[in-house]
Image (tube, grey):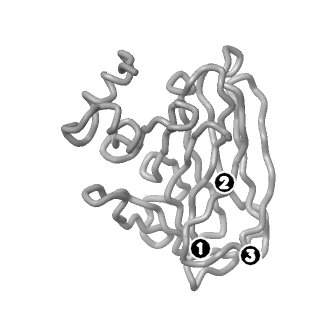
Amino acid sequence: MGLSKWEEDLLKNADAVIDKSPMEDLYAGVFFNQNRKKYWIDKATFGNCFMVFARDFSVEWGSDKRYWDWPSIKETSDVFIDVVELLQVSRLSVESKFDTANLTAGMNYEVVFVMMLKEDSDGWSAPVTFRLDLPNGNKQEHEESLLKKPRSQWFEIQVGEFMVEPKNDGIIKFMLGETNSGGWKRGLVVKGVVIRPKK
C-alpha cells in the first residue's frame, strides 16, 4: 500500500527524521506540531488515528502556576510530551478541537480522553461533564463520576462518536468540565484525546 500525498506531506513535517519504511512509521506513529499531536494508521481498519496532546488544549487558568502544572513525561524511548496536571481549581474547563478532514471517510470514530487521577486527588464528588460538538451542530454530552476511577494509572473516558461523512466535515470540539459544584478539585492529569476508528 503506497502513501497518499497527505501522508507524504505529514511525514515531511514530522518532528523527527523518518529513517525506517514510511508504512512502519505510520503504524507506529509519527509526532508533529512540536509533539502536540501524534498520527498513526490503525492496522485493523487502516483508518487514520490521532492523539491531540494536552499542550494543544485550552485550559482555564492553565498558565497560572498556582492552579496547573505542565510536566513532561516520556511517551516513547526518545519522545517527551507535556501533560497538564491540576493543582487546584474550583472551575474546571479543558477543551480543544480537531479538523475531521484528516480522518478516514466513511468510518465511525470515537473521541476518548486519556487521563489519570493521582493518589492524593481530591474534590471529585461532583460528576464531570464531557462534551463533543460536531460540525453539523449536534452535541453529545454526558456526566461521569471520577470517584471510583483507578489512581496513578491512565484510563480512558469516551466523549462521543461520529461518522466521517460530508455533513460532519469540519471542526469537532471536545471538552471536559465541572463548574457547578464550586468545590476545589486537585490531582487530575490530562494526557490528551485520542480520535480513532471505533471497533
Cα separation between marks 1 and 2: 14 Å
Q: Give residue 176's mark.
A: 2
Question: Residue flagged by tag 3: what amino acid is it?
Answer: Leu
* Residue drawn at 73 percent across, 22 percent down: 136
Q: Nearer the viewer, residue 180 or 18?
A: 18
Looking at the rendering, which quadrant does residue 12 occupy?
A: top left
N-term-proximal mark, 3 vs 1: 1
* Residue drawn at 55 percent across, 67 percent down: 154
Question: Would you call the spot at circle 2 few (<14 residues within 10 Å), some (14-19), or many (20 or more)?
Answer: many
Quarter of the picture containing the N terminus is top left
Give percent across and percent down for residue 119: 57, 84
Residue annotated with mark 1: 117
Looking at the rendering, which quadrant does residue 128 occupy?
A: bottom right
Which residue is most to the bottom? 120
Cα separation between marks 3 and 2: 15 Å
Front position among marks 1 and 2: 1
N-term-proximal mark, 3 vs 2: 3
Secondary structure beneath disc 3?
A: loop
Q: Is residue 175 above or below residue 107?
A: below
Question: Residue flagged by tag 2: what amino acid is it?
Answer: Leu
Give percent across and percent down for residue 15: 26, 41
Question: Residue flagged by tag 1: what amino acid is it?
Answer: Leu
Question: Along the horizontal axis of the image, is 172 left or right of 127?
Answer: left
Residue annotated with mark 3: 147
* Residue drawn at 38 percent across, 59 percent down: 82
Cα separation between marks 3 and 1: 9 Å
